[in-house]
């Protein structure tokens, strides 16, 4: 699709944004036009840098009137290419950085779209609360981005995805009108829930400018442990034991294959072997409780019973926050550690928890047949059925050749996931990478309904036009 933004539109945008509110400097644009893994590069004639919601409304209104397309970008941490423009006006939320309100009695904070996840965590902590969305990219990922992609992370098991943690939104709709839905209500049963349409819409139904986020108490006790296990099925069985043993206090329950751990040890400085001997699979578990000492005691019972049952081969409980961070580093660095290894086919799969092991077994066998020698690594969130299933170029293989087979290989992986009742995108969204692929798996009825919703709000299809249906 060739995109052209008329010169008069660019002149009007410059006028409403003023000095410092826009850029066409190639050096300023460059980092925003490159996906962090170097998979996608983009182009834009104009970078809009609004400082206020009114600025956003002015930009969108001008573009809507002219039919000029817009791509919105937060921290540029997306993994499916939706944030990289291909000729559209690029609207960055980087200057929308205000924490507008923190309300402990309502367990709520309101943050503008460009506030980083780390800054939201800090604002919540300052009043003895927490916002429980945990991502490895928290220092860069923004509130607008996590809302627009319905981000998941490591604590979905206990708190749900971003969708469950948003009380209200402020957004500029595709025609440039401002909708203020920054409520703090737990209950509001008064018709269609517009905020839920915008959450996960990947910028196609408007620009999220601020969000009211649900906060939770800071818990008094915490325990983090890593355990060596024989198989993904053992991890699934351990999850059920963890829930029962902790009384529902499981914060996170993560799975890692040995190959992924090897990549981290090899490519991430400061990483250390977690246990005395290597194991084919690892579980990283975190318990947290409001009762002092409760999480630690529950973790000890859980691991002891897992060892007795033969589900755990060896385990270590973190003895300090430093050691807990080291354990988490093995998990959070799974993706960054792959980059030096060469070309990768990445998959963000969801299956029912009961079918995680079946998916990993079937997909691994399919990749051995389709791409002999390719290195398969799987890791992810056992508690919510989300597995990141990645297929790396064979050792010493050619990156270009491997990349050329990505679409065919991914189709096999996706067919297996959907055949098991799963999804081809658990938490990353569709972006430009998966939009066409996802249409294969949705019914005619569902696609027609989705397209009707989009057309009603964005009849000119100016908002992130390459993304969704």
Image (cartoon, rainbow, N blue to C red):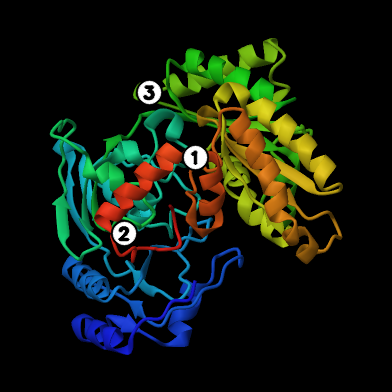
Image position, residue 26 (x, y; %): 47, 86
Q: Going 67% across and 47% down the picture, which residue do you hit?
A: 410
Visible in this render: residue 129? yes
How would you rate the neighbour count of disc 1 (Cα within 10 Å): few for under 14, some for 14-19, many for 20 or more? Answer: few
Comes first in the chain, label 1 or label 3: 3
Q: Going 63% across and 44% down the picture, which residue do you hit?
A: 330
Image position, residue 221 (x, y; %): 41, 28
Secondary structure of the residue carrying tag 2 is loop
Query: Above or below — where is 378 with respect to 32?
Result: above
Q: CA distance from mark 1 to mark 2?
A: 34 Å
Do residues under tags 1 and 3 come within 8 Å of each other at their CB atoms? Answer: no
**Near-viewer residue (467 or 342):** 467
How would you rate the neighbour count of disc 2 (Cα within 10 Å): few for under 14, some for 14-19, many for 20 or more? Answer: many
**Near-viewer residue (437 or 348):** 437
Tell me, for residue 292, which label it has, or none: 3
Q: CA distance from mark 3 to mark 2?
A: 32 Å
Query: Above or below — where is 44 with respect to 200?
Result: below
**Residue 128 sits in which quadrant?**
top left
Do residues under tags 3 and 2 come within 8 Å of each other at their CB atoms? Answer: no
**Near-viewer residue (306 or 325):** 306
Visible in this render: residue 200? no
Q: Which residue, given by chain and number where applicable, does mark 2 sit on?
A: 115
**Residue 339 sits in which quadrant?**
bottom right
Q: Is residue 154 left or right of residue 317?
A: left
Tell me, for residue 442, which label it has, or none: 1
């Amino acid at each position: 699709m060739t995109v052209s933004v008329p010169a008069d539109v660019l002149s009007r945008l410059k006028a409403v944004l003023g000095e410092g509110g826009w850029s066409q400097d190639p050096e300023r644009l460059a980092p925003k036009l490159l996906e962090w893994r170097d998979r996608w590069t983009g182009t834009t004639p104009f970078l809009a840098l609004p400082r206020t919601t009114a600025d956003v409304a002015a930009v969108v209104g001008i573009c809507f009137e002219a039919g000029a397309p817009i791509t919105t970008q937060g921290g540029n941490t997306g993994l499916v290419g939706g944030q990289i423009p291909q000729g559209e006006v690029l609207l960055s939320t980087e200057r929308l950085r205000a924490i507008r309100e923190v309300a402990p009695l309502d367990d709520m904070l309101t943050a503008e779209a460009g506030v980083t996840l780390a800054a939201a965590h800090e604002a919540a902590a300052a009043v003895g609360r927490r916002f429980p969305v945990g991502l490895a990219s928290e220092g860069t990922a923004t509130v607008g981005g996590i809302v627009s992609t319905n981000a998941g992370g490591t604590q979905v098991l206990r708190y749900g995805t971003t969708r469950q943690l948003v009380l209200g939104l402020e957004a500029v709709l595709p025609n440039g009108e401002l909708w203020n839905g920054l409520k703090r209500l737990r209950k509001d049963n008064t018709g269609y829930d517009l905020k839920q349409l915008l959450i996960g819409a990947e910028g196609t139904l408007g620009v999220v400018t601020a969000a009211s986020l649900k906060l939770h108490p800071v818990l008094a006790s915490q325990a983090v442990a890593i355990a060596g296990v024989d198989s993904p099925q053992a991890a699934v069985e351990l999850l059920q034991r963890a829930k029962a043993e902790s009384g529902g206090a499981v914060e996170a329950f993560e799975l890692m294959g040995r190959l992924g751990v090897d990549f981290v040890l090899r490519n991430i400085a400061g990483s250390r072997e977690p246990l005395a001997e290597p194991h084919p699979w690892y579980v990283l578990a975190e318990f947290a409780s409001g009762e002092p000492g409760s999480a630690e005691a529950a973790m000890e019972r859980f691991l002891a019973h897992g060892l007795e049952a033969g589900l755990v081969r060896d385990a270590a409980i973190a003895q300090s926050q430093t050691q807990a961070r080291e354990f988490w580093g093995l998990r959070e660095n799974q993706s960054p550690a792959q980059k030096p290894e060469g070309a990768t086919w990445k998959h963000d799969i969801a299956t029912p928890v009961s079918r995680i092991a079946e998916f990993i077994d079937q997909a691994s066998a399919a990749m051995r047949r389709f791409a002999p020698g390719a290195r398969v690594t799987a890791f992810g969130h056992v508690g919510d059925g989300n597995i990141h299933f990645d297929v790396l170029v064979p050792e010493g293989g050619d990156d270009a050749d491997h990349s050329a087979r990505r679409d065919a290989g991914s189709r096999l992986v996706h067919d297996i996931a959907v055949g098991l009742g799963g999804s081809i995108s658990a938490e990353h969204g569709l972006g430009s990478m998966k939009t066409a692929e996802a249409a294969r798996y949705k019914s005619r009825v569902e696609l027609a309904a989705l397209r009707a919703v989009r057309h009603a709000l964005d009849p000119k299809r100016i908002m992130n036009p390459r993304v969704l249906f």
